[in-house]
Image (cartoon, helix red, strand yellow):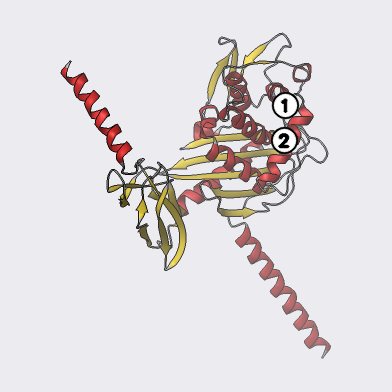
Amino acid sequence: MKKFLTLELIFLVLFFNISFVRAAETENSLNLTCGGAVLIEQNSGKVLYDHNMHEKLRPASVTKVMTLLLIMEALDSGKISLTDKVPCTEDAHKMGGSQIWLDTKEELTVDEMLKAMCVVSANDCTVAMADFLAGSQETFVNEMNEKAKELGMNDTTFKNCHGIDEDGHLTSAYDIALMSRELLTKHPGITKYTTIYMDTLRDGKSQLVNTNKLVRNYEGCTGLKTGSTSQALFNLSASATRDGLSLIAVIMKGETSKVRFSEASKLLNYGFSNYQYKSLAKAGENAGEYYINKGITNKANAVYKEDYGVLINKKENKNIENNIEIYRNISAPVNIGQKVGEVNYYSEGEKIGTVDLVSKNEIDKYGFGVITNSIYKNWFTLLRQTH
C-alpha cells in the first residue's frame, strides 16, 4: 500500500511539473529573458503576446513617453507652439544622467527640446519642458498620474518626469504599451522626432545620435523610447509599421542593451509574421447615396466617418462581410457630418464593428428664401462672367 501511494505521489508530482513547464512555454513561447514584455496592435490595442506584462518594474527613461504625450497634447490644443522659447530652469541645469548640458542663460524652442528628448533622452530638456508647461515638476507629475489614470494604467505610479530611479516610481510593460499607443495614435506627429537617427542642435555644435538603434536597423521602425538605469536595467518601447499593420513591443528589465533590442525585434517579427491589418473603410470615402425630403437637392453622398479595419490572424483567414444601412426619410436641412446611416461588419456571423455614415454635404431646406438666395447668387455669377 505504501509503495502504491509513493508511486502515485511521484506520478502526480511529475504530472504537475510537466503541466507547469508546458504552461510556461505557452506563456513565453519566444523564450524571452526580460522581466516583462508585451506586444500589441496599435490601432485596436489588442494584446498579441504577453510575458509578465503586469509586473511592476522601474521604467527608467521610457517614463518620457508620458511626458511627450502631455507635451503633444499641449501642442495640438494650441496651448504652446513649436517655436515657443523654453528657458532652462535651475532644476533642469542640475539634472544628471543623459542630457545636452543646458545652461541657465540658454533658451531652446519646443521643437529643439522635443528633438533632444526623443533622440538622446535629455533629462535636462525634459525638466525644462515640465517647468514650462506646468510651472513645476511636482504639478507636471500630478498631471502625468492623472493621465495615467485616465488611460487605465493601473500598474503605474509616476514620481518624476524623467525616469531616474526613485522609490515607488513604477509601471508595467502593459501600461507602457497603453501610453505609447495613445501617443502614436492621437499624436502621430511625434514620429517626426522618434524616427531621427542622427541630427544636431545649436547650429551643428551638438551632435545627436538616437539611443534607439532599431530606428536604423529595423524595417518600418517608427520609434519610440529607450530607458536604462542600474536598477531598472534596459527598457524599450519599440514601434513599427509594415503593410498597414502597426505594432508596439515593450521590453522591461532586459539584462543588456543588446537583449532589449533583440527581444523587441523578436516580438515585432512574431507580430508581422502572424498577423495582418485589413483596411475596411477610409474616412471621407463614398459609401453610397442617401435621399432627402424637402431639400434643394433630393440626394447626396454618404461617406465613412472614420477609418476602420480589423486585425487578422494569417492562420485563420476569416471572411469579413459588411451590411450597409442608409437611413430613409431624411429631411432637410442636413448638416455636414450628420449621421445618415451605418455599416456593420461581421466575421463568421458575429458582429465585430460598426462605422457611422455621415453626410458629405450641407443640404438646405427647400423654400422661398433659399430660392431667392440661389437666384441672386446665379445673377451675380452671370454679371461677373459678362464683364
Where is residue 302? Give x, y as percent: 34, 48
From this viewpoint, is residue 278 visible? no
Instruction: Give coordinates of residue 351: x percent, y percent.
Output: 46, 63
Q: Which mark is residue 190?
A: none
The image quadrant that residue 315 belongs to is bottom left
Q: Mark 2 and 1 residues: CB-CB less than 8 Å, in contact?
A: yes
Asked whether, in this view, residue 143 is left or right of residue 204, the answer is right
* Residue ID at (37%, 59%): 325
Q: Is any atom of residue 161 visible in this view?
A: yes
Residue displayed at 30% across by 32% down:
373
Secondary structure under the numbered disc 1 in the rendered image:
helix
Give the residue pinned by disc 2.
143
Among numbered discs 2 and 1, the one appearing first in the sequence: 1
Dividing the picture into quarters, in which one does residue 75 lie? Answer: top right
- Residue farthest front in this picture: 368
Pointer 1: what residue? Answer: 134
Across and down, in percent, residue 380 comes to 24, 23
**Residue 72: horizontal and vertical position, in percent?**
59, 30
Q: Amino acid at mark 2?
A: Glu
